[in-house]
Amino acid sequence: MLHGILNIYKEKGYTSHDVVAKLRGIVGQKKIGHTGTLDPDAEGVLPVCLGRATKVCDLLTEKDKTYRAVLLLGRTTDTQDITGEILGETDTDFLKAEEVEKAVLGFVGEYSQIPPMYSALKVNGRKLYELAREGKNVERKARTVYIREIHILKIALPRVEMEVTCSKGTYIRTLCHDIGEKLGVGGCMESLLRTRVSSFCLENSRTLGEIQKAMEEGSLLQNLIPIDAVFGQYRRVQTEARQEKLLYNGNTLCIKDERDVPADKELVRVYDSRGEFVAIYQYLAGLNQYRIVKMFFNGRKTEE
């Protein structure tokens, strides 16, 4: 069994689940999971976790993401993108680039966003897009999202091309809609490209076709990113052989290294005596102990 992360470039027309299903066929294993849904018409970075790396899925979903989007002003749709039914169109000839720029940048920071009806969020056990397809419109609670940065790449009205870095749970479609509402002309998303998820970037992503070719050529491992690469910002701590039983069982550890003592509650990557990544621990200075946060390896070699 393969254990690691593939930085997939999701092409248009595929759902995130389609990508997982195709990868299962390519690599011949079931234990695969993606790290956050991309709409079928969106494309770009989709980290996919294999084997023990599936334990990273929820952690990557929490990370900030960067998108390149095109906002089309003057049109509103039921899906908040150009694939939906047109609900209204408004002339935008009176708009000036300066006021558009001011409106767009006004969304940087925290803002209250109402999720779109065409989304996978559930209300009373049913996905919103299922209800939307039945012609139902239910009340959705606004959620606080955080727009860290917006770089306006080009304004050629009625279109605005922008790069957005945002927190998890942010709908770029809804951001486009809300910018249009603020300008009084409506708006929808014309295109979306995800360029980054945490440290996974567009330039290092691979299409399913490229992964298929690598599998056939026997070079797939060259594209497989180690699990611990996700935690590269954490300090590395290595145990001695006598502590490995405690480590593999997720027990509290006492690792003496007076040269490099972590700060209180600092997260660290813990490796066994052979240098194999095992778990994420947290250092508790008051007790001079490391306590388990997330286990990735149990010491057995029988998972292959």
Image (tube, rainbow, N blue to C red):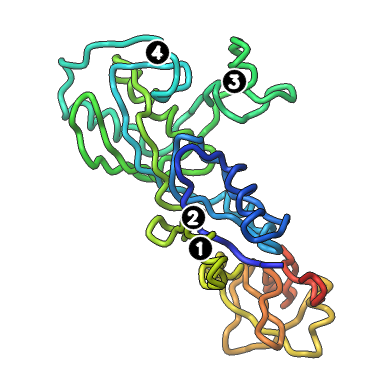
Q: Which callout, 4 or 2, points at the residue further toward the start of the chain?
A: 4
**Residue 266 is at least partly visible in this image:** no
Distance of label 4 from label 3 (alpha carbons):
21 Å
Q: Which callout, 4 or 3, points at the residue further toward the start of the chain?
A: 4
Q: According to the image, label 2 marks what residue?
A: 209
Question: Three-letter amino acid code at disc 1?
Answer: Lys
Residue 48: quadrant of the picture = bottom right
Under circle 2, the secondary element is helix
Q: According to the image, label 1 marks what residue?
A: 213
**Residue at image coords 57%, 45%:** 36
Q: According to the image, label 4 marks what residue?
A: 86
Say if mark 3 contacts mark 2, CB within 8 Å. Answer: no
Say if mark 2 contacts mark 1, CB within 8 Å. Answer: yes
**Residue at image coords 42%, 62%:** 204
Q: Which callout, 3 or 1, points at the residue further toward the start of the chain?
A: 3
Q: Quadrant of the N terminus?
A: bottom right
Say if mark 3 contacts mark 1, CB within 8 Å. Answer: no
Is residue 187 shown above or below 295? above
x and y percentages locating residue 188 in the rendered image = 37, 24
Q: According to the image, label 3 marks what residue?
A: 140
Say if mark 4 contacts mark 2, CB within 8 Å. Answer: no
